């Protein structure tokens, strides 16, 4: 890989200009190398009082680990050096030990790698000081180079030429010399820095049957995880405002938010942080992951303490025994928390919108949080209870946040992750304009300083095999629905972002071909298994369907050597229908001597929830879990049985039911069994989807279709059509905007590198400090536009109208 660079937070303050110089020089010097570099990699000591964060950390395939401590001082500010101790004047501190500090940081990092047997003492390591405002001549003139403690230093001279900088680092003395890393060692080192599970969960090699599902799971779980660059970027970076994370099922959204919240807490322990979710069964999962992250990045010296920590893990509602986000705000405003049973809606998601809207209408919301992170963001949308054109839960969260910077009060650190395909209550997509209204929609367009994105799309699924994810997409979006596609992206780059190659024009009435190209090497089960991953069967009656279900589960437990907790059953249908089917299935399996567990109940083979003591419980040792798709979200199993397809067959255009099937399909780590009764047209659609494999041909339509926008270009075109004009900082690199009417648009500081703006009407546009390098502006109308500070290097200005343009 080429060099990857992660600034964990923007370098924006005046005092960080020197650090920025060094960081930019490192990116130039290591840009073509196989390396991963961080600005402020998070390593912490107890309580966060003495942070060990290196200014710059480089993991280089050839050089090993390199820590650089930056001191942005002039030579006149150094009074003297005695051993490792430097004395300063006119600086924020009087004394320092920069090289000793770099050594401490480096040894803390080596502690991580040395825990792995194949990395122990096998990673080369260097520590250096960077002095961006001091030349080598100035240093020598003071005689500091003659001191016995003279450390390896990068001077101002070295930062000018990338080749020189790399050579200086390579020639510097090492604290540890080791042989060249192997590829396995390199990948393991990267995974160690990421803080992800180094190897998949260990499974005892108990199976002797080479083609049993148990054996396949064992082989898959023993493989080394590869570093996901995009996940690492999102998890480590702390944005200075809103951030929207769209991710396919199984892309790691929950894990990323947990690590992000944990690192925020460790870095800024005084911050009040809320990590919010909607499915109660995720409470234990999220708490365990946050605790794992805190322990990992403090070298096991800290753990999560729910009572004392300023990081609060909160269900969106809350209950009598567990505080939630809504109930917390109610307590702070001395308002009584209204339960679901007392609302008009009487549905958890709509009722939450109802009570949040009421709270916003009746009281002032105090600004008590510094950051709020929301998982399952799609489940917090409502159709009926909007507050002044905004989504009430999100507006409540926004109001409860302190501004990141008082100078820009609109910027608040609200981060939400979602997958619109898993929405079981609303057809809306949680874009910024839907959540906060058009006036704030621009807040997630573009990126922050140091390339920290405001909107991210996670397209790589770590849970389910490619073939199953492809079927899930095709059914949820209705590629082969009888009349037309039901949900769609309107731009080619958006289809590519979820793994599809498009042939044909994305215009209504035109035939297109979608071919699934994703290479999901994160899930190796499909490559190891020699049979079908999806089994589909229709029965004449429910007893026949359940009889075969019981037989297959018994086979899984005996011949496949699976554990009961490897199996999940998901009935489809409305709440009433799915609950009836849960009870029917549970009773049938119990008669077949198969232990079952229904989430929220007290014990195995219990059919009713008699108390709220087990509300968060989803699995029970020794039992097969039966849960509807609402409860199953966020969970996963080796084998998933989806029953009751007939409930979708009766209402094939119901997007919620299609999303239920999507959720069911994407709960599996390996295999899926689909079944239903009767005869419905939807069955033919499903059969065709399975038969088509990875290629789909259909007539494209943009009318009467739910459109999803995940790129800045799509958001710009849709938002502009709705009357929005502010798209400052938008990332429109290589975007095709030819012949569009974009008069008076605000593209201040936008990235328009290599964009196609041929014949585009940009009259009166604000393009101040926009990057138009290599942009095609041939025939574009820039009359009255403001291009002060814009970069027009190699831009094509042939026949461009520049009347009254301000440069």
Image (cartoon, helix red, strand yellow):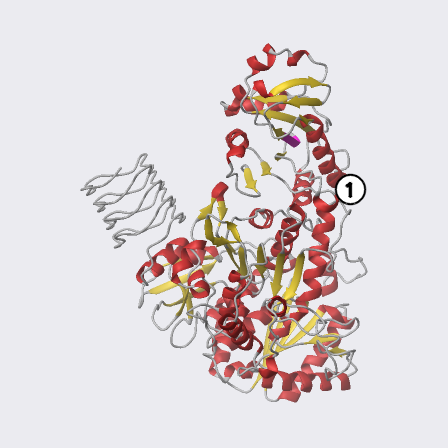
Q: Position of residue 178 (x, y in %)?
A: 73, 29
Q: Quadrant of the C terminus?
A: top left
* Residue interval drawn in magenta: 64-68
The answer to whether residue 284 is left or right of residue 278 is right
Of the pair 699 and 143, the residue shown nearer to us:
143
Q: Secondary structure at mark 1?
A: loop
Of the pair 379 and 773, the residue shown nearer to us:
379
Q: Residue at x 41, y 48 (%)?
A: 731
Residue 218 falls in image quadrant: bottom right
Q: Position of residue 401 (x, y in %)?
A: 54, 58
Q: Is residue 502 magenta?
A: no
Note whether 204 is above or below 599 in the view shown: above
Q: Position of residue 3 (x, y in %)?
A: 54, 36
Q: Residue at x 52, y 48 (%)?
A: 240
Give the main secondary structure of the magenta stretch: strand
Q: Does residue 1 appear in the picture of this structure? A: no
Q: Does residue 185 appear in the picture of this structure? A: yes
The residue at which mark 1 appears reads as 115
Of the pair 692 and 330, the residue shown nearer to us:
330
Residue 339 falls in image quadrant: bottom right
Q: Quadrant of the N terminus?
A: top right
Q: Position of residue 625 (x, y in %)?
A: 71, 75
């Amino acid at each position: 890989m080429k060099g990857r660079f992660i600034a964990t937070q923007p370098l924006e303050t005046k005092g960080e200009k020197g650090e920025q110089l060094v960081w930019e020089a490192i990116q130039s010097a290591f840009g073509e190398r196989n390396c991963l570099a961080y600005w402020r990699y998070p390593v912490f000591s107890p309580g966060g009082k003495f942070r060990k964060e290196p200014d710059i950390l480089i993991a280089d395939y050839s050089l090993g680990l390199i820590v650089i401590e930056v001191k942005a001082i002039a030579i006149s500010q150094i009074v003297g050096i005695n051993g490792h101790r430097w004395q300063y004047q006119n600086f924020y501190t009087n004394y320092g030990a920069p090289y000793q500090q770099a050594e401490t940081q480096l040894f803390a990092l080596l502690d991580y790698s040395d825990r792995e047997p194949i990395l122990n003492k096998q990673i080369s390591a260097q520590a250096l000081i960077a002095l961006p405002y001091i030349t080598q001549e100035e240093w020598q003139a003071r005689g500091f180079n003659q001191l016995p403690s003279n450390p390896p230093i990068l001077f101002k001279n070295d930062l000018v030429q990338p080749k020189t900088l790399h050579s200086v680092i390579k020639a510097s003395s090492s604290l540890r010399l080791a042989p060249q890393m192997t590829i396995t060692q390199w990948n393991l080192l990267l995974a160690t820095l990421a803080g992800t599970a180094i190897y998949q969960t260990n499974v005892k090699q108990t199976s002797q049957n080479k083609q049993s599902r148990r054996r396949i799971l064992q082989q898959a779980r023993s493989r080394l995880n590869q570093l996901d660059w995009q996940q690492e970027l999102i998890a480590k970076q702390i944005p200075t405002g809103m951030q929207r994370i769209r991710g396919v099922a199984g892309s790691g959204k929950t894990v990323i938010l947990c690590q992000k919240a944990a690192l925020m807490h460790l870095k800024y322990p005084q911050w009040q942080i809320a990590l919010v979710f909607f499915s109660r069964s995720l409470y234990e999962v999220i708490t365990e992951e946050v605790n794992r992250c805190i322990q990992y990045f403090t070298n096991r010296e800290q753990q999560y303490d729910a009572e004392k920590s300023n990081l609060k893990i909160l269900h969106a509602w809350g209950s009598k025994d567990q505080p939630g986000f809504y109930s917390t705000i109610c307590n702070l405003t001395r308002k009584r928390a209204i339960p679901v049973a007392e609302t008009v809606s009487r549905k958890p998601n709509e009722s939450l919108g109802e009570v949040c809207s009421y709270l916003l209408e009746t009281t002032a919301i105090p600004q008590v949080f510094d950051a709020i992170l929301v998982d399952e963001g799609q489940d917090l949308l409502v159709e009926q209870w909007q507050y002044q054109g905004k989504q009430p839960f999100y507006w409540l969260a926004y109001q409860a946040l302190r501004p990141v910077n008082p100078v820009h009060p609109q910027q608040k650190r609200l981060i939400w992750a979602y997958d619109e395909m898993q929405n079981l209550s609303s057809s809306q997509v949680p874009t910024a304009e839907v959540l906060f209204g058009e006036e704030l929609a621009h807040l997630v367009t573009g990126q922050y300083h140091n390339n920290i994105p405001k909107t991210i799309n996670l397209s790589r699924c770590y849970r389910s095999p490619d073939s199953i994810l492809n079927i899930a997409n095709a059914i949820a979006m209705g590629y082969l629905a009888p009349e037309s596609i039901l949900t769609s992206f309107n731009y080619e780059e958006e289809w590519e972002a979820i793994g599809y190659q498009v042939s044909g024009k994305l215009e209504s009435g035109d035939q297109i071909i979608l071919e699934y190209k994703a290479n999901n090497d994160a899930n190796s089960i499909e490559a190891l298994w020699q049979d079908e991953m999806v089994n589909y069967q229709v029965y004449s009656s429910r007893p026949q369907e359940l009889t075969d279900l019981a037989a297959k589960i018994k086979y899984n437990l005996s011949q496949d050597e699976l554990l009961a907790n490897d199996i999940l059953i998901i009935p489809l249908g409305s709440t009433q229908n799915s609950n009836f089917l849960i009870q029917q299935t549970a009773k049938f399996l119990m008669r077949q001597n198969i232990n079952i567990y229904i989430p929220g109940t007290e014990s195995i083979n219990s059919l009713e929830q008699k108390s709220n003591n087990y509300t968060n419980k989803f699995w029970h040792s020794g039992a097969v879990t039966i849960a509807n798709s609402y409860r199953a979200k966020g969970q996963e199993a080796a084998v998933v049985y989806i029953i009751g397809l007939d409930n979708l067959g009766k209402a094939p255009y119901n997007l919620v039911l299609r999303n239920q099937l999507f959720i069911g399909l994407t709960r599996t780590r390996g295999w899926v069994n689909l079944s239903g009764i009767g005869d419905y047209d939807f069955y033919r659609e499903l059969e065709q989807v399975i038969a088509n494999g990875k290629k789909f041909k259909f007539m494209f339509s943009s009318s009467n279709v739910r459109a999803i926008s995940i790129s800045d270009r799509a958001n710009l075109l849709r938002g502009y059509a709705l009357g929005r004009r502010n798209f400052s900082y938008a990332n429109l690199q290589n975007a095709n905007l030819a012949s569009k009417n974009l008069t008076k648009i605000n593209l201040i500081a936008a990235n328009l590198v290599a964009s196609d703006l041929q014949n585009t009407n940009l009259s009166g546009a604000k393009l101040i400090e926009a990057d138009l390098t290599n942009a095609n502006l041939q025939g574009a109308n820039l009359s009255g536009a403001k291009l002060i500070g814009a970069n027009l290097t190699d831009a094509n200005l042939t026949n461009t109208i520049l009347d009254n343009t301000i440069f």
